[in-house]
Amino acid sequence: MDFRVTFWGVRGTFPCAYASHLGFGGNTSCVEVQAGDRTLLLDAGSGLRAAGKHLRRDGIKHATMLVTHTHWDHITGFPFFEPAYCPDFSMDILGGHLQGVACISEALATCMESPLFPVPLETMRADLRFSWIQPGDVLDIDRGITIRTASMNHPGGAIGYRIECAGRSVCYVTDTEHVPGLMDASILRLIEGADMVIYDASYTDEEFEQRRGWGHSTWSEGVKLCQEAGARRLCLFHHDPDHDDAAMTAIERAARERMPTAFAAREGTTLDLRRD
């Protein structure tokens, strides 16, 4: 059974179309997981546009989108997702932590309303099915594919995901702020023994001290969590817009000194979890 992870957007907060950032990538959060014959999309940042074109080229007719939360950098690609305008495509869209709205469909519809966007959600001709989920829910979306969820510490809340398939697991733990000196018990449970943890490594320790309350974490906290939970690999994710390729190379090097299997996510790369 296939179990592959492709990074379409790895940047946090704001897209960066700068030559100095293109080695690691400038698009915001969007990760594709191919689990058997199921296509899962984690978040709908600006990387979703390229993901959509890839799905159309490959003839993919159905996907499941798991949204951590609906801050702009995690949904800005949704109006530009080409398959959503095609009547031969269908998608289940799951999300929670939506203060002030009844369902994730309302949040996505709002971002496409005038004067924010010229094309309303109703223009999308695909079969889009929206579902509300709560942190802690366990979803069996197909035979042999299980998704576990947990709450993240982020302004307004966010949801982390663990996808299990064919005896392997990948965790998507982004937009969460750690409490110094206290490991997050819900994250530890979510990532226990995982093959790969994609973690919010927005800041260095020094930067974090100036940005407490912003809802993000550090690469060093990711190392601590993975080592405590016995996770095999740490993927640094949600790169800060101020971290160019030189800065990201230095951060990756520092993380590997502490955890040799750590690496920084690079846009456009695919990892095969069956062989990795």
Image: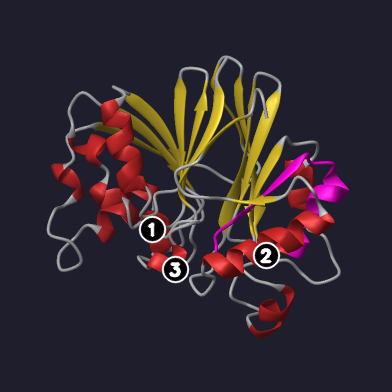
Left or right placement of residue 260 versus residue 127 in this view: right
Residue 200 occupies which quadrant of the picture? bottom right
- State the residue at coordinates (32%, 24%): 58
* Residue 224, visible in the rendered structure: no
Determine whether the residue tagged by mark 3 lies in a helix, strand or loop: helix
Q: Residue 101 in magenta?
A: no
Mark 3 → mark 2, Cα distance in angstroms: 15 Å
Q: Which residue is mark 3?
A: 20
Q: Which residue is mark 1?
A: 101
What amino acid type should be assigned to the residue bearing mark 3?
Answer: Ser
Question: Looking at the image, do the residues carrying marks 3 and 2 touch, with CB atoms under 8 Å apart?
Answer: no
Determine whether the residue tagged by mark 1 lies in a helix, strand or loop: loop
**Picture coordinates of residue 25 (x, y %)?**
45, 56
Left or right placement of residue 73 versus residue 114 in this view: right
Q: Nearer the viewer, residue 106 or 143?
A: 143
Q: Mark 1 or mark 3, which has the lower sequence index?
A: 3
What amino acid type should be assigned to the residue bearing mark 2?
Answer: Ile
**Picture coordinates of residue 255 (x, y %)?**
75, 59
Question: Looking at the image, is mark 1 or mark 3 nearer the viewer?
Answer: 3
**Picture coordinates of residue 17 (x, y %)?**
35, 65
Q: Which mark is residue 251?
A: 2
Label 2, residues with CA under 10 Å away: few <14, some 14-19, many ≥20: many
- State the residue at coordinates (76%, 45%): 261
Specify start and end residues of the magenta stretch as a single range.
220-239
- State the residue at coordinates (26%, 53%): 109
Q: Mark 2 or mark 1, which has the lower sequence index?
A: 1
Mark 2 → mark 1, Cα distance in angstroms: 38 Å
